[in-house]
Amino acid sequence: MFTLPYRTLIHYKRWATNGLNGVVAETFDRLPADEQVIVLRLLDHIQVVDEIFSHNLEARPHNYGAARSPELPALDALAGKARATNDWYADYADTLRPEEVDEVIDFPFSNGEPASMTRGEMLLHVAMHAAGHRGQVALLLQKNGIQPWPDRITDFLKAESAGNYGVNPRGGRRAVEACS
């Protein structure tokens, strides 16, 4: 089916985000204070962009004037919002019809500049955008001797086929909710 790559990317994004958030929650106090702020800012930025584009996909206005929250949320709030937003995207991708993938939607960027993208391009954007910033968070974790969640689509596909969404591919469960 033509929409399968979008579904796979969005479900992978949910799995990888929940896994990373689980690792961060378990090890956050091991990071220096300045790097805790950087991690929160990166996770918040991912979340805000995800929320903006979910509104764009529904042709609804968003209330963001920038691609970050006015006040930096706490880690548990960010993780909860990420789970809910990623569930929304997974449901959206699951119900996306082939004829909708190339539908162009006009919307404003958070700075007010007009833009237009197809539904498929928006899904690709949120998946790729989040992947880049998850990599930045993973680097900060590694720098501090913390093993990040394995952020490879091959690990996701293996976990998905085995029904092990909340299991770390290297072994052991993490503090993440299942992504079924």
Image (spheres, rainbow, N blue to C red):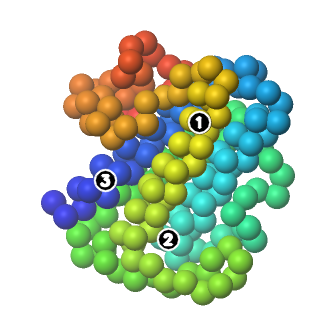
Please identify the quarter of the rendering in which residue 74 is found. top right
Residue 139 percent across, percent down from the top left: 59, 36
Reading the image, the residue beneath label 1 is: 139
Residue occupied by mark 2? 58
Alpha carbon of mark 1 to alpha carbon of mark 2: how far?
34 Å
On the rendered structure, is 135 left or right of 109? left
Residue 162's image quarter?
A: top left
Q: What label sits on residue 89 in the rendered view?
A: none
Q: Residue furthest front?
A: 143
Question: Could you say whether the residue bearing mark 3 is in a helix, strand or loop?
Answer: helix
Viewer-closest of 135 and 11? 135
Identify the residue position indicated by label 3 in the image.
7
Q: Tell me the element at label 2.
A: loop
What residue lies at 31% left-to-right and 53% top-to-bottom?
7
Q: Residue at x 50, y 19 (%)?
A: 174
Q: Which amino acid type is marked by label 3?
A: Arg
Residue lying furthest left in this view? Answer: 1
Dot 3 crowding, Cα within 10 Å, few <14, some 14–19, many 20+: many
